[in-house]
Structure formats: C-alpha cells, structure tokens
Amino acid sequence: MIIEVLASKEAVGKRASEYIVNQLQNKKSSTICFATGSSPLPMYAHLIELYKSGSISFAAAHAFNVDEYCGLGETHPQSFRYYMKENLFDHIDLPLKNQNYLHGDACDFKAEAENYEKKIAELGGIDLQILGIGENGHIGFNEPSPRFSENTQVVELTEETIAVNSRFFENPDEVPRYAITMGIREIMKARMLLMIATGKSKAEAVKKMIEGEITPACPASIIQQHENAVVLLDYEAASFLQ
Ligand code: GLP
C-alpha cells in the first residue's frame, strides 16, 4: 500500500487527478469506477480543469459507480448518478454510452446487480477504482458486518451512515434506508485502488484501515491486502496514524 499525506484536501484532489491522468495516458480505454461523497470533489473539479485545458480526455474511457441509493432515480438531486453528472460527467468528453451506473429505481435489483457485474467483466474488469471511506469504515456502501461481502447487492444502511449522510438531504427522514453497492470482492478485483480520505472526521477510520487488523468490522481494512492500493490523505485524516 502506498500512503501519501498532503497538506490539504485540494492538494489531495490534485494528486488524485494525476493518478487518473496517468491511467488514461497508459490506456485511453480505461475502465474507471467512481465514488461519490465530499472526498473526491476536489479531484473532480481538477479533472474538469485538466479536460478544459486539453490535458486529459475521457473519450475512450468507460465509467462505473461503486454504489447508489435504492429508490432514487437519476433525476433525484441526491442520487449518485445525478452527482456524477453534475460534478464530472457533464463537463468532460466521456460519452454517454460509456457511462454505466447502478439504477436506484430498478424494479429488479438482483438482475440490476448481475447485469452490472456482467458489463464490468465484458470490459475486462476495472482498471482504477476510486474509493472514499465512511466514518464507520465502510467502502461503497459495504457497512461493518460479520463478514466481507462479495457480489453487488442491496444493503441496509446503518443508523450512523444515515445520520452522517443526512447532511445532503433537507430532512433526515428522506435518506434512503437501503442502497445497492458493489461488494468487497468486486471492489478488490480492480487492478488499482485509489482511496481518498480527508478531514478529522475520517482520522479514526483511516487508522483502522491502515494500522488495524483486517476485519469486516472495518470493511476498508481489506485494502491492506490489495497489491496496488494508493491512499491519499490530508494531514487531518492522517492525524491518528502512528
Ligand atoms: C458515502 C458513500 C461512499 C463514500 C463515503 C464517504 O456514504 N456511499 O461511496 O465514499 O460515504 O463519503 P464522504 O466523502 O462524503 O465522507
């Protein structure tokens, strides 16, 4: 695992975008799996700048998303599909046909999950997986549980996650109770993991992820086993590390 500690979340975003540039330079048709939340926003803003200055193109890339709320369609402002369009996809040259996402308003989530994994496999797997970490150590929406999840599936969100994510909703009652997420095994299949964590609220989870035992009680700890994982932190998120 490579760990880089940078001075600010903006510096983390800039550094993270360098990994994306490098990935697309090595393979224009890279398959990238994106994450939502506040952590990757500086990276997305920087990628848009790089695109506008002609330094990067997503024209041959393929995109996926690690998770989505159940019940929210793509026009819902809190859906992750909407977030990706607003914060990145509508501002770059990634073709619409190459934008894959989990449909939060799917009628059949089992079929949705199977089709999603099939599409990823058809494209040869994920080259670069972007991840954030929840305050409880979740990755995607894989919450702490007795064992590591495997496939893409519907999960029940913990009260903690609902409370943390309620900041994005007008009313905490509007936060969906269920989400569909790629499983840990699917996430770990990516050829490279790029984990981004910033802010003091992540310090405890970051410590467990990097220095703790590998346990499904902290799902992010599994990335210790990945052969090509990069963790980008700001000082605050890194502040509890030995
Ligand atoms: C959310 C998402 C994750 C995200 C994480 C951290 O609930 N499901 O994909 O990485 O929690 O979010 P944030 O960056 O806003 O702290």
Image (cartoon, rainbow, N blue to C red):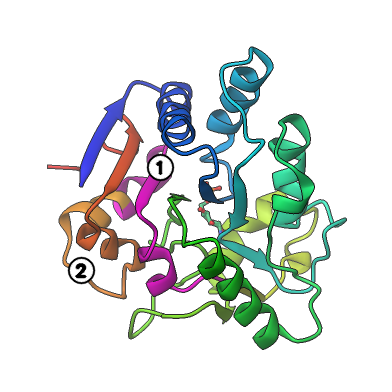
Q: Is residue 76 above or below residue 109?
A: above
Secondary structure under tag 2 reads loop
Residue placed farthest to the top in the image? Answer: 53
Q: Give the answer, above or below, for where 112 lies relative to 239.
A: below
The mark found on residue 205 in the picture is: none
Tell me where the magenta segment starts and ends, as one range.
181-205
Residue sitting at x 49%, y 34%: 24
In depth, the one of 225 and 144 nearer the eye is 225
Foreground of the two, 196 or 198 = 196
Where residue 175 sits: x, y (%)?
Answer: 72, 66
Residue 203 within the magenta-colored segment of the rendering: yes
Which dot marks residue 197? 1
Dot 1 or dot 2: first in sequence order is: 1
Please give the name of the residue rendered at 16% of the width and 54% of the height, measured from the top-left corner. Answer: 211
Look at the numbered disc 1 and give the secondary structure of its residue.
strand
| Figure check: 175 above or below 82 | below
Query: Which amino acid, mark 1?
Result: Ala
In the picture of the structure, the residue carrying the numbered disc 2 is 214
Ligand 1 within 8 Å of the CB at mark 1: yes
Q: From this viewpoint, is residue 240 visible? A: no
Residue 153 horizontal side relative to residue 25, left or right: right
Residue at x 67%, y 50% (from the top left corner): 167
| Amino acid at circle 2 | Ile
